[in-house]
Image (cartoon, helix red, strand yellow):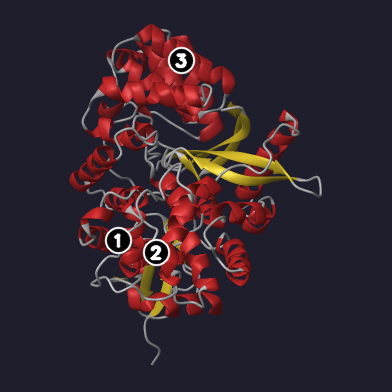
Amino acid sequence: MPGPVEVFCSCCNPSLKIKSRAPVGRVVPCPNCGRKFRIELPTKDDDAWEAEDEKYSCDLYEYEVATSTVDTEDECEPRPRRRTARSSSSCGRSRSGTSKRKSLSRFNPLIVAGGAVGAALLVTAAIFVFAGGNGGQEIDPARPQIASPAGLDIGAGSVLEKGIGTVDGTADISDEEIAQLGRDFAASISSENSSATVALMDFDGLSDLITRGLGMSASDRAGFKAGFRQAFLQPVSFVGQMVAQIHAGGSIRFQRVLTVDGERRALIRLLQSDGAVSYNELIPVRRSDGRIRVLDVYSYLTAERISETGRRGVIPAVAAKNRSLLERLTGTDRAAAEYFRRVNELVLARQRGNHRGILRLSQALPTELKTDKMLLLLRLQAAQALRDDPEYVRAMEAFRSAHPNDPALDFVLIDYYALKEDKPQLLQCLERLYKRTEQDAYLGSLLAETVLETDDLDRAASVVTAAIESEPDLQNAQIVLFRVQAERRDFDGCLKTLTAAFRQHGFYFGNNAQVRALGPGVAAFMDSPQGERYRRVAKGG
C-alpha cells in the first residue's frame, strides 16, 4: 500500500504529508499559512532536492485532507487572521461576503524577508552545485578557532567587501529604458513567468559581484554561476517568492525611476493579498549586446543589495572549502564558517517552511551568530509567520539592539511600533519610507491612516488625496479617503468613494458595530440617506 505523499503549499512552501494520492488536484487550506493551494505531486527534480536535504529537515506537518474541507476554487485566498493594529479596510467585505482583511495600519514584512533573505538562501543552494552537492567540507563546530590576522575584517569597507559595486553605472541608460525594464520585470512576475523574469537579469554580472576576491577557482566560479541562475527558478528564491505572492492574489507594479546616490533605479512595489507590502529597487546595467538588464536589486527590508546579501551567504560556504580564507575571517563571518552545518540547517528549515524549527535552531546558535543580520531576519520572519507576537517583538528588539543604526530598521520596526501602539515612532518610520519612495501611494495610504488616528484630519486629507491622485484605483487609499470624508461629514464624497471601491474591487462596508466603531463620522454616514443609497448600490438596487 502506498505510503504518505509529500507535497508543498504554493504560497508558503512548507512540506506537508497527505496519507494518499486521492486529494491530488484538489484545492485545500494550508495548515501553515491558511491560504488555499492546489495539491500537486512534486517532480522528479523536486524529489531529488528533498532527498539531498532530508537529513537536515525538522518535523513535517502531518496533514490528512478531509473531503468535506476540500474546495474547488479561490486558490491561495487568505483566511481571516488577527491583526496587530486594526485597519479600516479589515472591517469590509468583498462581493462574495468573505472578509477582505487588508491591513492599512500594519506593515507585514514577510514577503520582503522571504524575497531578500531568500537571496541568501538561493546563494547557499548554488553553493551546493559547485561544491558537489554537500556544501563543501564539513566544519567541526567543536574544534578550536584559529587566530585571525590582525586588521583583516570581512565587514563593510574591508578588502573582500570592496568587491561589491556596479559595473559601469547608469549614465548611458535613459530614464525611459529603466522604466521599461521595471515594467517588463513587473509584467513577467504578474504573468507568473519565472523564466521570463530570470531572462531580464544579468547573472554573470551579479555572480561576479558576489564572488569577486574570494579566491574561488575558475571551475568553482563557473559552477556557481550555473547554479546561481538555476537557483533563481526555485520557489524559495527572490523571483519564486514574488511569483507565489501573485499566485496567492497579490499584485506587483513598477512605480517610478528613482535616483539614489547618483544611481538611477526602477522602484518595484509588491502587495500581498492581505495588504503586506515590499519594495525593491532594480539596479540596471547595459551589457555588451546593448540590452538593459537587472544587475542587482536593493531590498528595503535588508537595506542592502542582493549582491551584498549573497556575498555574506557565500563567504562562510567558500571558507568551508578554503582554509586560507577561513583563517582571514573575523566576527560573524568566521562564526558562520565555523558553524556552517548549523547555519545550513537553519537555511534548509526556511526552505521547508518549518518556522518552529527556525526558532528552535536560532536559540541554539552560538552567541556570535545570534546577532547576524540575516539570521535575525530569518528568526523574525518565522515568529511572524507563526503569529507569535511575544517572540516577534523579541526578535525585532534583538535586531534593533544588534544593529541600532541599520537603515533596515525603518522597515523592520513598522510592526514593532504598531504592536506597541507607539504612533509617534510609527509615523517617523512611515515618513522616512514615504520620502525614500518619493511619496508612493500605498505608503501614503498607510501614513494617512496613521495620521488620522492622531486626529490630524487636515494632514491625513492632504496625504491621502495625493495618494488617490497618483493611483485613483488604489483600494487602501479609497478606504482612508472615505474615513476622512466621513469625519468631515462630506457624505456625498463618501458615497462616491465607496461606490468606486465596490465597483472596482467588490469591496463593501456593512452597517455593523465594527464599521461604526471606526469613528463618529463613519457611524453618521451609515445612518444618512447617502449611506442608505450606498447599501442599495451594493445590493444591486
Residue placed farthest to the front in the image?
A: 150
Relative to 457, does residue 183 appear above or below in the rendering?
below
Relative to 455, does residue 369 appear above or below in the rendering?
below
Q: Residue at image x 37%, y 82%?
A: 4
Relative to 82, does residue 52 appear above or below in the rendering?
below
Residue placed farthest to the bottom in the image?
A: 1
Relative to 267, does residue 165 appear above or below in the rendering?
below
Of the pair 476 and 199, the residue shown nearer to us: 199
Q: Residue 499 vs residue 376: left or right?
A: right
Q: Residue beneath label 1, please?
A: 147
The amino acid type found where label 1 is placed reads Ala
| Crowdedness near tag 3: few (<14), some (14–19) or many (≥20) residues, C-alpha within 10 Å | many
Q: Earlier in the sequence, mark 3 or mark 1?
A: 1
The amino acid type found where label 3 is placed reads Val
The amino acid type found where label 2 is placed reads Leu
Of circles 1 and 2, the one toward us is 1
Residue 109, image x and y in percent? 38, 42
Q: Residue beneath label 3, please?
A: 463
Q: Secondary structure at mark 3?
A: helix
Residue 529 visible here: no
- Could you tell me how far apart the alpha carbons at marks 3 and 2 are, in whole angstroms? 52 Å
Q: Residue at image x 48%, y 48%?
A: 159
Of the pair 66 and 193, the residue shown nearer to us: 193
Q: Residue beneath label 2, please?
A: 326
Of circles 3 and 1, the one toward us is 1
| Crowdedness near tag 1: few (<14), some (14–19) or many (≥20) residues, C-alpha within 10 Å | few
Residue 335, image x and y in percent? 31, 59
